[in-house]
Amino acid sequence: MSHPLHKIALAAILGFCTAVPIGIFATHYTAAQDNLTNSESAILQTLDGDQIYNHINTLSKTPRVAGTKQEDAAATYIKKQFESYGYKTELQSFTFTDYTKPHTVELTLNHVTKSVKPLAFEFSVNGYATGEVISAGLGTVDELQNLDVVGKIVLLKRGGISFVEKARNASSKGAVGVIIYNNDDKKIFGSLGAENKIHVPAVLLTKAEGVVLENLIINKPGTKATIKIVGAQSKSNISQNVIATKKPSSLNKTAKNDVVVISSHYDSVEGAPGANDNASGTAMTIELARVLKTIPTDTEIRFISFGAEEAGLVGSTHYVESLSKNEISRIVANFNLDMVGSKDSGELVLQTVDDKPNLVTELAQEASKKLNGQATPFTQGDSSDHVPFANAGIPAALFIHSPPEPWYHQPQDTIDKISKTKLQDVAEIVSVAVWNLVRIDSQVK
Ligand SMILES: [Zn+2]
């Protein structure tokens, strides 16, 4: 089990589920629905906000941290719901690295009485390293080439190449420890990637601390440092994606073999019951599966709830990576639902990785215009499971309320903060948008 602060800090580094606040909000919840087609009206009549709310209530009794038995129980619950509507389901399991932050991170320097407060990198190894400090610029292969760093601690500046490359370049030349300092005054967190490829202790300093250290080495050559990192843990863990598939109707005469993916993640961060993040999107995925089950469509629909999103979009990345090129080309849209029901968040926005409209945002805007009189705005966002789809070239967007609620990733993210009105609003927009893509007489493709 990871320390809660680690999970929060990790989310801060990678920014999962965070949203960019924007200023233009659509006016929602005043349905001008007489322009809906009969099919759209029928879908909306079937859609039941209470069912979404009840699934959230069940799922958010406890946190559902990736790799725990609570996450596993949530997967079983989701699978059961899908199966109760007659779907065939698949549990797709995968492994991921669960990292626990060290409890002790120290850097001591001779000639320096002022205390330095280093940060550990995510995936820092534990260790005790002591040696002369030597400066090596940005830590590129070229810069290190003619330096003798064997048994020494290498001081590097952020920039040019990644933290992991810097640390690896230094350790592979024989350095026993690595200090990297920031190149601007903003607060940062650093990661050495997902695996422990660096076998020496590495710490991160502020720009001001780094500059002091650079000057110290110039003025007092031979300055020694000691790095101590204790308590970090990396262990392999298992999570799973829950997948329900609706095959195209047999009425289909114009099969294009297309697939639409409606997705959400069901894991939460430690200590947070995750009613909004993301039992809300999970519950909505379940309800959309129920509503769309018996409706004839010409397109395959996959309802997927991903595991281990909070550990770094692990489930969705695994899913997309497991697809063949041909399967990827069949997926024409990904509607991703994450944090779609808090009373205390802002208005609905659509987020795309490239900040450009695509098939998903266009359909959602058409639907929201029909339902609410105004198109839902879109903005840039790359903090949820739509990212691996977008990176694979699939039109993808995240449905999220922005700015996020104050309870984001907190123990107070509980069922009492959920708004049935907001759930209903998002579910209506997504169901109408999806319907217009999968209906048998679809002109949209
Ligand atoms: Zn989330």
Image (cartoon, grey):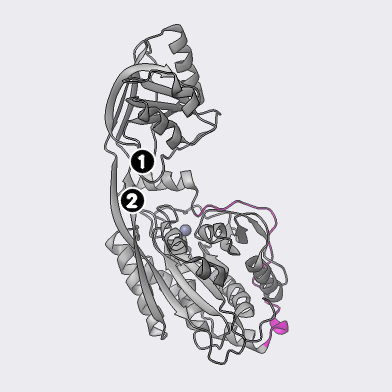
Residue in view at x 61 percent, y 58 percent: 352
Residue in view at x 43 percent, y 37 percent: 164
Residue type at the position of mark 1: Phe
Residue 79 visible? The answer is yes
In three-dimensional space, the C-alpha distance between marks 2 and 1, rounded to whole angstroms, equals 10 Å
Residue in view at x 33 percent, y 46 percent: 99
Residue that carries the numbered disc 1 in the rendered image: 123
Residue that carries the numbered disc 2 in the rendered image: 97
Q: Nearer the viewer, residue 286 or 388?
A: 388
Q: Which span is picked out in magenta? A: 17-37
240 within the magenta span = no
Residue in view at x 37 percent, y 44 percent: 5
Q: Position of residue 421 (x, y in %)?
A: 56, 71
Residue 420 visible? The answer is no
In the displayed structure, would residue 222 be above or below residue 249?
Answer: above
Tags 2 and 1 in contact by the CB under 8 Å rule?
yes
In the displayed structure, would residue 142 be above or below residue 368?
Answer: above
> Which quadrant is home to the C terminus?
bottom right
Other residues around mark 1 within 10 Å, as few (<14) / some (14–19) / many (≥20): many
Q: Nearer the viewer, residue 405 or 99?
A: 99
